[in-house]
Amino acid sequence: QRLPSILVGVDVTKGRQHTDFGRGFYTTTLERQARTWAWELSRQRPGSYPVVVRFDVNRDALAALEALWFVRGSYDADDFWSLVFRCRSQGGDHGRSSNGWYDVVAGPVAASWRQRLSLHDIDQMSFHTDRAAKILDASDPTVLP
């Protein structure tokens, strides 16, 4: 097994566009979900090996970031779904007037964004700026067995 390139440093520009919160580096607090995402992505890239990396992020450092947090992904959570719709359909940034991006966005995972369905008890936290990536890099990431 090769050392994952992610341990060299997080590059938020490598993320796919048209995802729930836009191009970035996505994490979850659930190890089972991280393992599922790792296997799904490795199947899409022949020759790659799924790896789960743990980041123990300093809360004070995280609090210093410009963040957007969504608690609910229910059908009537208009703020959540409007951002997901923008990111999924238009790509690009979050549409903020300053730099366009929040450093980090956290919330539910959309199962079907057009029908406003989210996955129950599954979360995601996406990192979108170099400032946010530096916090991940400073967290001493470790590969889980």
Image: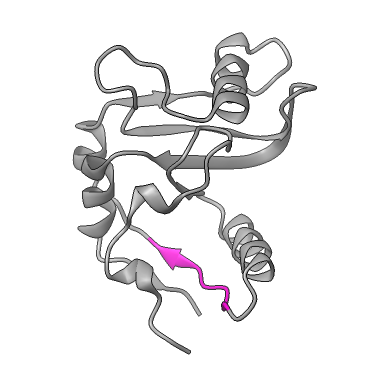
Q: Is residue 122 magenta?
A: no
Horizontally, residue 3 falls left or right of residue 115, namely: left
Task: Please say if 79 is above or below 91.
Answer: above
Residue situated in front as seen by the camera: 114 or 90: 90
Q: Residue at x 68, y 62 (%)?
A: 40
Task: Please say if 63 is above or below 82.
Answer: below
Task: Please say if 81 is above or below 29.
Answer: above
In this view, the residue farthest toward the right is 115
Residue 85 found in image quarter: top right
Colouring method of the image: one colour
Name the magenta segment's main secondary structure: loop
Q: Which residue is drawn at 34% across and 27% down?
A: 102
Pinpoint residue 33: horizontal percent, then vertical percent.
Answer: 62, 55
Pinpoint residue 55: horizontal percent, then vertical percent.
Answer: 36, 59
Residue situated in front as seen by the camera: 132 or 43: 43
Horizontally, residue 10 falls left or right of residue 4, namely: left
Q: Residue at x 46, y 40 (%)?
A: 23
Residue situated in front as seen by the camera: 58 or 36: 36
Pinpoint residue 79: horizontal percent, then vertical percent.
Answer: 55, 12
Q: Residue at x 33, y 22 (%)?
A: 100
- Residue numbers of the magenta segment: 48-54
Residue 67 found in image quarter: top left
Q: Is residue 53 magenta?
A: yes
